[in-house]
Amino acid sequence: MIQRIDKIISSQMNISRNDARSLIKGGSVSCDGSVVTDSAFKADAEKSEITVNGKPLFYKEHIYIMMNKPEGVVSATNDPKTKTVIDIVPESMKRKNLFPAGRLDKDTVGFMLITDDGDFAHRILSPSKHVEKTYVAHLRDVLSGEGKEILEKGAVLSDGTECMDARVRIIDDEGKKVEITIREGKYHQIKRMFASVGNEVVFLKRIAMGGLPLDDSLLPGECREISAEELEMIEKGKLCCDNAQ
């Protein structure tokens, strides 16, 4: 992938093109062992050995981040009043044009996928793809057998919206902690589904997207990159019941 070297540096270091040009002009950039001082110099972003201040630059066309979203931050690129998921991405992972792929409510926690790859986000969010999303919901009341059956067959929300069938599993002895898997992403869907059967969600955590579970080593607010193999698990996989939390 042949590109201008100022563009490569800008995209990979999350700095402006002007700042990248200043680094180049100052002699801080080398390509394949030779110092580059011309910002218009072109290099193969994937094959050339580029260093900035002696440190190698490892090119990635896109970045895919798994975040354990904490409560109180919004799923947006920017917000003038509230901290966003992009605000808490570590500086080492920040890139231009990062955005959350999908959304979680402000008070919902768990698996948030953040990327700069619009095509990938479209694929996993497209209604036609039906990529599964799995949640753990803590309920106000015990989920009745009738309520569970309605959710599994397809709940009808208060405004008449019909939901697709869901997979539901009670995961505590009391019957107030439930794992639920859906294949859609309607507004406040999980909360509205349980409301449709006379219940209320008091805590909600997304624990998986597709076949990829949230890394349980991530503390709230922490992030890590997602590998190519894990991306395939999101697009093609289904979560095994053994991965439930």
Image (cartoon, rainbow, N blue to C red):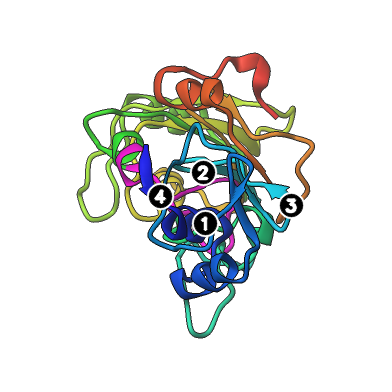
- Helix, strand or loop status at disc 4: loop
224 vs 165: above or below: below
| Amino acid type, label 3 | Gly
The answer to if 158 sits in the magenta stretch is no
Which part of the image, by quadrant, shows the N terminus? top left
- The residue wearing badge 4 is 102
Few, some or many residues within 10 Å of mark 1 (<14, 14–19, 20+): many
What's the residue at 33%, 26% (across, down)? 165
In x, y percent, where is residue 89? 63, 59
Relative side of 7 to 66, left or right: left
* Residue assigned mark 3: 54
Callout 2: helix, strand or loop? loop
Q: Residues under labels 3 and 1: Cα distance?
A: 14 Å
Q: Earlier in the sequence, mark 3 or mark 4?
A: 3
Pointer 1 residue: 9
Amino acid marked by disc 4: Gly
Mark 3 or 1, nearer chain start: 1
Describe residue 177's horizontal placement relative to residue 38 as left or right.
right
Look at the numbered discs 2 and 3 and tell me whether their residues touch, using CB distance below 8 Å: no
* Mark 3–mark 1 CB contact (< 8 Å): no
Q: Which residue is mark 2?
A: 63
Q: Earlier in the sequence, mark 2 or mark 3?
A: 3
Element type where label 1 sits in the image: helix
Give residue 69's position: percent from left, percent from top.
Answer: 63, 53
Which numbered disc, 4 or 1, marks the residue closer to the eye?
1
Q: Residues within 10 Å of mark 2 (few under 14, many from 20)?
A: some
* Mark 3 or mark 4, whichever is nearer to me: 3
Q: Magenta region: which residues?
A: 100-121
For marks 4 and 2 on the same chain, the one whose residue lies earlier in the sequence? 2
Q: Is residue 137 visible?
A: no
Q: Position of residue 78 (x, y in %)?
A: 46, 73
